[in-house]
């Protein structure tokens, strides 16, 4: 009898969860942040010890549950990630960069020479832009789920490109043709 009650309760909880939570996988930002922190605690033995302790003490389980029930739902319905703020150092092929996220965009700062680029997303116009030395330039804007509008050349000319391998290839051909034409 007790087994039937537990099985019915689990089935009811699963049905309630599928009805009340959005069908969004989400970024699991809290859990990923916790795992990222754990990977840099110390050497691999200390990292494993902390991982095991956090697993036994249900720290990971609680963070994953918070992501599933709260944070991923907020991200799905609002379109912004409530945990998307912070800093990270990235090793690039030409040096190190500090990337700062304020939830609205990114500041990319070169650790080599201190130069800075700002990347912003405008939700009204659905476009990504970058700012260098106080001048803002559009990188691209979303037309629909399958197309983006991208600049061509240095003027105010734009073209629409399909978001696919063929579309990216076609755009690279346009850009390369323009740059080789300009160099003649």
Image (tube, rainbow, N blue to C red):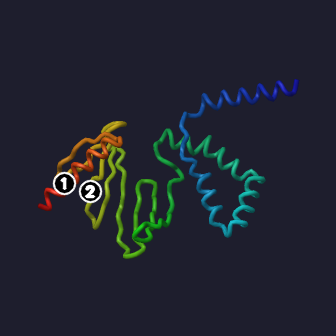
Q: Position of residue 37 (x, y in %)?
A: 62, 62
Q: Nearer the viewer, residue 114 or 73?
A: 114
Density class for disc 1 (Cα within 10 Å; few <14, some 14-19, many ≥20) is few
Seen at 41% across and 59% down, the residue is 106
Residue 151 in the image: state x and y as whole percent.
Answer: 23, 50
Q: Secondary structure at mark 2?
A: strand
The residue located at (36%, 55%) in the rendering is 120
137, 146: nearer the viewer: 146
Q: Nearer the viewer, residue 69 or 117?
A: 117
For numbered disc 1, what is the local secondary structure?
loop
| Mark 2 neighbour class, 10 Å CA radius: few under 14, some 14 to 19, many 20 or more | few
Q: Is residue 13 left or right of residue 27?
A: right
Task: Kindly identify the residue that appears in the image at 81 percent across and 29 percent down.
Answer: 6
Q: Quadrant of the N terminus?
A: top right
Q: Nearer the viewer, mark 1 or mark 2?
A: 1
Residue 137 is labelled as: 2
Q: CA distance from mark 1 to mark 2?
A: 12 Å
């Amino acid at each position: 009898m007790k087994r039937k009650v537990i099985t019915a309760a689990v089935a009811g909880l699963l049905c309630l969860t599928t009805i009340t939570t959005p069908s969004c996988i989400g970024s699991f930002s809290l859990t990923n942040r916790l795992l990222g922190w754990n990977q840099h605690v110390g050497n691999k033995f200390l990292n494993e010890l902390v991982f095991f302790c956090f697993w036994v003490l249900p720290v990971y389980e609680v963070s994953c549950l918070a992501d599933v029930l709260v944070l991923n739902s907020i991200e799905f319905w609002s379109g912004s990630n409530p945990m998307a703020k912070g800093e990270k150092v990235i090793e690039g092929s030409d040096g190190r960069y500090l990337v700062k996220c304020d939830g609205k965009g990114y500041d990319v700062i070169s650790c080599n020479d201190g130069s800075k680029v700002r990347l912003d997303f405008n939700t009204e116009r659905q476009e990504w832009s970058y700012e260098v030395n106080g001048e803002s330039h559009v990188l691209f804007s979303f037309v629909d789920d399958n197309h983006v509008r991208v600049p061509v050349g240095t003027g105010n000319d734009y073209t629409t490109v399909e978001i696919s391998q063929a579309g990216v290839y076609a755009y690279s051909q346009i850009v390369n043709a323009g740059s080789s034409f300009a160099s003649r």
